[in-house]
Amino acid sequence: MGFQNEKEYLVYKQSVSDFLWKEVDPLVPQMEETNHIPKDVLFPKFREKGLFGLIIPEEYGGMGLNTVQYLPILAELSKVSGAIRALIHVHLTSARAIVVFGREEQKKELLPKIATGELSVAFAITEANSGTGLDCKTTAVRKGDDFILNGEKHLITNADFTKLFMVACYTGPRDLGRKAMSAILVDLDTPGFTNDPMPHIMGCKGLGHGILIFKDCVVPAMNIVGEEGQGLEVFLGELEASRVFVAASSLGTAERALELSLDYAKKRVTFGKPIASRESIRSLLADMAMDIYGLKLMLEDVARKIDEGKPCPLEASIAKTHGLEMVCRVTDKAMLVHGGRSYLQSWPIERLFREARLNVLEEGTPSIQRMVTARALLSGQLPWALPW
Ligand SMILES: Cc1cc2nc3c(=O)[nH]c(=O)nc-3n(C[C@H](O)[C@H](O)[C@H](O)COP(=O)(O)OP(=O)(O)OC[C@H]3O[C@@H](n4cnc5c(N)ncnc54)[C@H](O)[C@@H]3O)c2cc1C
């Protein structure tokens, strides 16, 4: 399915928003309490709405949204439930790596199933005993038409239901650095592959994480995504867009926190006046709006650049860092506006505060983002935005 024009897209966007508020929002308290996403209830509806295939091209059965169209839907998901947002985000970010780097036969085989949610792919980069990227300890040694995979990954989102994992590993000598790293798809049923659940997380309740262990797993060489030795490119390319997707999630959470704060400030009366009439509260609200507006403009710029095929790692890192820091500031301020009630689990601000903190850790900490930003600046790049 695709959209003939902007109006059709807007109708679709509204229908997704209506669906999220009518059918997902009422389930959020139950998800918070039970640490469980009712997938049997929700997945058929996500499929019907096209959520599993939002950014998968139409020719492979997806909705074919571009980045400019996808970000507002991601932000809306974030407003309703951080857990559902993260579930869809990981599913689609991994799918996007196959769209961009996969071989044609891989795309034809996998993407139509991913677009309906019949199959999900998770990405597995992080390791408990090494740093992210070139410090990776997982190895895959070539043996005929196969690779023999050994290593461990942890904190892997969606591991509770995913069947296919895109694993970062060395397929060549470590001293070759990035040229020796590959991304390989590993099926859960592969002998020697174990997937153990991890403890519940602070926010985004119901989202599942796994520890993956590979012991002499025989993986067909044709499961490499893109080319052998292209792994870092696959993951960095995936992460560049993904950082923008995480920033859009920060935007949604922050916008919801502001909406709730505006509403509360008008209703809460102390000493005979709504707190919205107090300078201190007005100042908090104004600060929140300034922060949100800044991110929204950054996202408009970087989304357009991605859709135009312009490399923008600098802008993506800046948007991600600004997003994660601003959503923490905004949810802090929303708590101040709400006073003591914000600390009660029955109030959505408490949940948004916890959900916002995931954005800080997802796909590169603020220090790593600043490192990427400074490296690009010192090599002569500047984040010039919309033409002046
Ligand atoms: C809820 C959740 C879901 C996640 N989902 C996934 C997933 O689906 N797939 C996946 O692969 N990963 C996933 N992760 C992992 C996440 O991407 C990492 O936690 C994050 O990138 C940080 O890596 P780390 O935990 O290994 O921290 P560390 O690398 O141990 O970093 C700890 C601190 O040290 C700093 N640091 C580390 N190395 C350096 C250095 N060389 N120079 C300067 N500072 C440094 C970091 O910035 C950080 O502040 C998830 C994490 C969480 C919390």
Image (cartoon, rainbow, N blue to C red):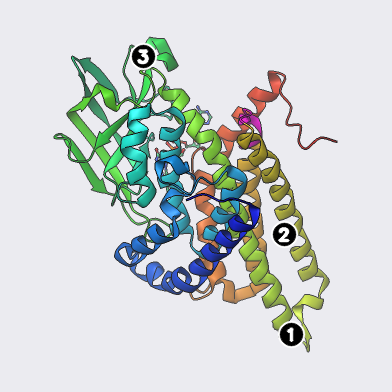
- The 10 Å Cα crowd at callout 2, few under 14, some 14 to 19, many 20 or more, is many
Residue 312 seen in this snapshot: yes
Q: Which residue is at a point 30% across and 32% down the rendered structure image?
A: 185
Name the residue type under label 1: Thr
Q: Secondary structure at mark 1?
A: strand
Residue 204 vertical position relative to residue 54 in the rendered view, above or below: below
Q: Position of residue 250 (x, y in %)?
A: 59, 52
Q: CA distance from mark 3 to mark 1?
A: 65 Å
Q: Which residue is mark 2?
A: 288
Question: In which image quadrant can residue 201 be found?
Answer: bottom left
Q: CA distance from mark 1 to mark 2?
A: 22 Å
Report whether the residue tagged 2 is closer than 8 Å to ligand 1: no
Name the residue type under label 3: Arg
Name the residue type under label 2: Met
Q: Which residue is mark 3?
A: 174
Q: Secondary structure at mark 3?
A: helix
Say whether residue 294 is left or right of residue 307.
Answer: right
Q: Which residue is at a point 36% across and 14% down the rendered structure image?
A: 174
Residue 221 vertical position relative to residue 41 in the rendered view, above or below: above
- Where's the C terminus, which quadrant? top right
Q: Secondary structure at mark 2?
A: helix
The circle drawn on residue 270 is 1
Q: Which residues are magenta?
A: 309-317
Circles 2 and 3 in contact, beta carbons < 8 Å = no
The circle drawn on residue 252 is none
- The 10 Å Cα crowd at callout 1, few under 14, some 14 to 19, many 20 or more, is few
Question: In which image quadrant can residue 314 be found?
Answer: top right
Mark 3 vs mark 1: give the one in front: 3
Q: Position of residue 387 (x, y in %)?
A: 81, 35
